[in-house]
Image (cartoon, grey):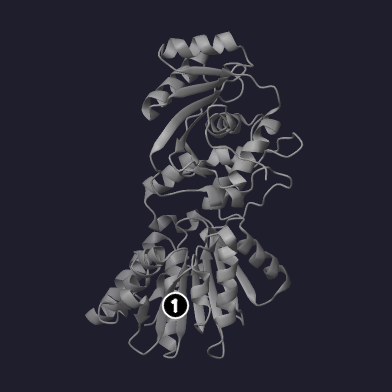
Amino acid sequence: MMLKPFDWLTQDNKAAAKAQRKLSTILTRGERNRFDYVWEYFARPSQLPPEGDWRIWMIMAGRGFGKTRAGAEWVKMIADRNPGARIALISSSLAEARAVMVEGESGLLAIYTAADRPRFEPSRRRIRFSNGAQAELFSAAEPESLRGPQHSHAWCDEIGKWPLSHGRATRCWDNLLLGLRLGGDPRILVTTTPRAVPLVQRLMKQHQNADDIVITRGATTENEGNLPERFLHAISSEFAGTQLERQEIGGELIEDIEGALWTRSMLEVARETSPAPALMRVVVAVDPPASATGDECGIIVAGLGDDGIARVLADCSISDAAPAQWAQRVADAAREWDADRVVAEANQGGAMVESVLRAADRALPVKLVHARRGKVARAEPVAALYSAGRVRHAGMFAQLEDQLCGLLAGGAYAGPGRSPDRADAAVWALTELLLGRSARPSVRQM
């Protein structure tokens, strides 16, 4: 008996278990050992190559969808069928290409049996398959490394996070296209989380006018059977209700609002995952709510590194909090981050704000600031600091970033909630660090 792929995928779990038990009785031990590696029987339809004469297939889906496994299996299929295949494996860095695309839990080495596994030559950044096919690793941070080599196929992973400075992402892509001239049917697979960066937007626009570009969309929840429940709960609680949830989990491409001071691309460029350098100053900025039942209390922690770059370190904002509650949250943040100053907007009653903060901690180094201009006007010079590369985000701050991307030139706010309180607190913090009188670094007009 031979079951067709997906025969049991539409059945309930009991039927699937019954089909698997039946298979275990009719297969030899060697066949059972290899069965786990027969991708067509376990993949979802959205993880398999689409039919047709496509040139570029882009899987643009949420985190944990199974994009990496789909990419590795596609490369395996190409290599196994074509001894002359020369495949480019491109990621944002060589380290990531190796850690994710090659040696990761869903990478190329993991999807072969021990007997059939290709040979990885790290020093040569090359994978040699038993039939003669080869794959070579490249970094999108070095676009010129793709100038010259020729390939028949390519797997481009997470193009949404390829380096954007100096146009490296698009230069890497263009050099890849110019070198994709081996064989009679060159093809590219792209696996990425949707991000509104120029290269992703370029492919989306081309897709609208070209028949040879196919896009597969998907959400994290489509693969929830293979994901830890704790992971699903964590991402739901962390990103629920934000645009980043729609992007990172739902697999939706979030377009920038026309006229916004901050764009998604700008924030992706500013995102930093490596440890921050030594901090010269740390401030906690607070934008108090007008009432205990009104807007959020924006509380942002930011620091100035010895490299002259400011970093948003934490978002400690709180909703529906009485004055004593948000003041205690500020005091806790100042203590945790060893802040040398607490900057508090005093427009909603300066004496009250200071007294509430002092009640939470008499030693708080409070500095009251008065807003003489609107939130957007205050934000404009800070947005310029982002454009100049003077600000980084030490992680992902979904709600804060949604608010930043909702601030529009001209004074309007088109983001979530009634007021951009988190964004305003961030503006106060970064103004204190980079634009205040005591800040040594400054942005000068040339």
Determine the residue located farthest toward the right in the rendered image.
410
Residue 253 in the image: state x and y as whole percent. 62, 55
Work out whether 343 lies above or below 108.
Answer: above
Q: Compared to 311, does 228 lie above or below?
A: below
Quadrant containing the C terminus is: top right
Residue at x 43%, y 49% (from the top left corner): 273
Q: Is residue 206 above or below residue 384?
A: below
Q: Position of residue 289 (x, y in %)?
A: 59, 20
Q: At 32% across and 75% down in the image, what residue appears?
A: 123
Q: Dividing the image into 4 quarters, which one contains the N terminus?
A: bottom left
Left of 210 or right of it: where is 165?
Answer: left
Give the image location of residue 193, x and y in percent: 53, 58
Q: Nearer the viewer, residue 220 or 152?
A: 152
Residue 363 position by quadrant: top left
Give, as a three-letter code, the residue at label 1. Val
User: Which residue lies under the disc numbered 1?
Assistant: 75
379 over 125 or under it: above or below: above
Q: Residues within 10 Å of mark 1 (few under 14, many from 20)?
A: many
Between 147 and 176, which is closer to the camera in this rendering?
A: 147
Q: How many marks?
A: 1
- Picture coordinates of residue 194, whole percent (x, y): 57, 57
Residue 4 in view (yes/no): no
Callout 1 secondary element:
helix
Query: In the rendered view, does 107 fall on the left or right side of 160?
Result: left
| Observer-nearest of 385 and 289 | 385
In this rendered view, identify the residue nearer to me: 378 or 8. Answer: 378
Q: Is residue 101 visible?
A: yes
- Residue at 57 percent across and 76 percent down: it is 175
Q: Residue furthest front?
A: 446
